[in-house]
Image: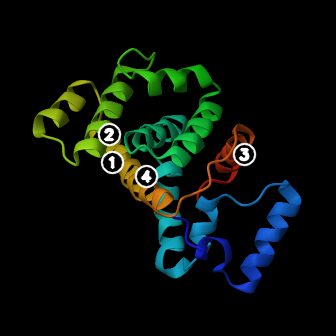
Amino acid sequence: MRPEVLNSGYQPMTKVLFRMIRLFTGRPLPDAAKLVFYRPGFYGDPAKRFTQLAMRGPSPWSVGDRELMAAVVSQANACTFCVGAHTATAAQAYADRDLVRAVLADVDTAPVAPELRATLRLLTKLTRDGTVSADDMRAVLAAGVTRQQIEDALAVATAFNITNRLADAFDFEVLDEDGFAAGARFLLKRGYG
């Protein structure tokens, strides 16, 4: 059930900002963005900083790789809003919608590097089962994934396991394809901060 606070629980200047965004973009602000404006000191600002670092901070993973990780984690959590948002963003980052679709359909047959495949398997298992074993980690390392890449991938998984749960708890409105594409352009240009 969607809480009314997501529609109206903002300071007057924030409401003006939302109207300006709608005026300039022709679209309402997505619920994911609205959420960070509600109680920014408690959730919004810390969440933006952490997600920005996980998704756009220095990493051996590309922006496309990390957006794909977000989509895979969201798919494992069955979070419709986040699957749509990060599928669109990964597709634009890679400039390859078919690649992203192939990974989400079957990571084992998708045309991705072995390191990325092993990492996506790990994130899926961690998200679904809530745990991974030492053998799981050894398999990822044996695929050529570095410890830094694992840490970076786990940061993405952490950010989106939280975001997925909030999106479902707050019943985020699922956008149409154009809405997700517009959001993807914004995320690729401005990031999460």
- Pinpoint residue 163: horizontal percent, then vertical percent: 46, 57
The residue identified by callout 3 is 179
Q: Upstream in the sequence, badge 2 or badge 3?
A: 2
> Between disc 1 and disc 2, whose residue precedes?
2
At a point 38% along the width and 53% down the height, the residue shown is 161
Residue name at image x 61 percent, y 25 percent: 97
Which label sits in the foreground, 1 or 3? 3
Q: Determine whether, in the image, residue 114 is placed left or right of residue 49.
A: left
Q: Are marks 1 and 2 in contact (CB under 8 Å)?
A: yes
Q: CA distance from mark 2 to mark 3?
A: 27 Å
Q: Which residue is mark 1?
A: 154
Say which residue label 2 marks.
Answer: 123
Q: CA distance from mark 4 to mark 1?
A: 10 Å
Label 2 vs label 3, nearer the camera: 3
Marks 4 and 3, how far apart at CA = 20 Å
Give the mark nearest the N terminus, 1 or 3. Answer: 1
Residue under the point 63% across and 80% down: 9
Vertically, is 106 above or below 47? above
Q: Which residue is mark 4?
A: 160
> Hey, what amino acid is under mark 2?
Leu
Closer to the N terminus: mark 4 or mark 1? 1
Which residue occupies the foreground of this view, 73 or 4?
A: 4
Q: Mark 4 to mark 2: distance in Å? A: 11 Å
Indicate the amino acid at tag 3. Gly
- In three-dimensional space, the C-alpha distance between marks 1 and 2, rounded to whole angstroms, equals 7 Å
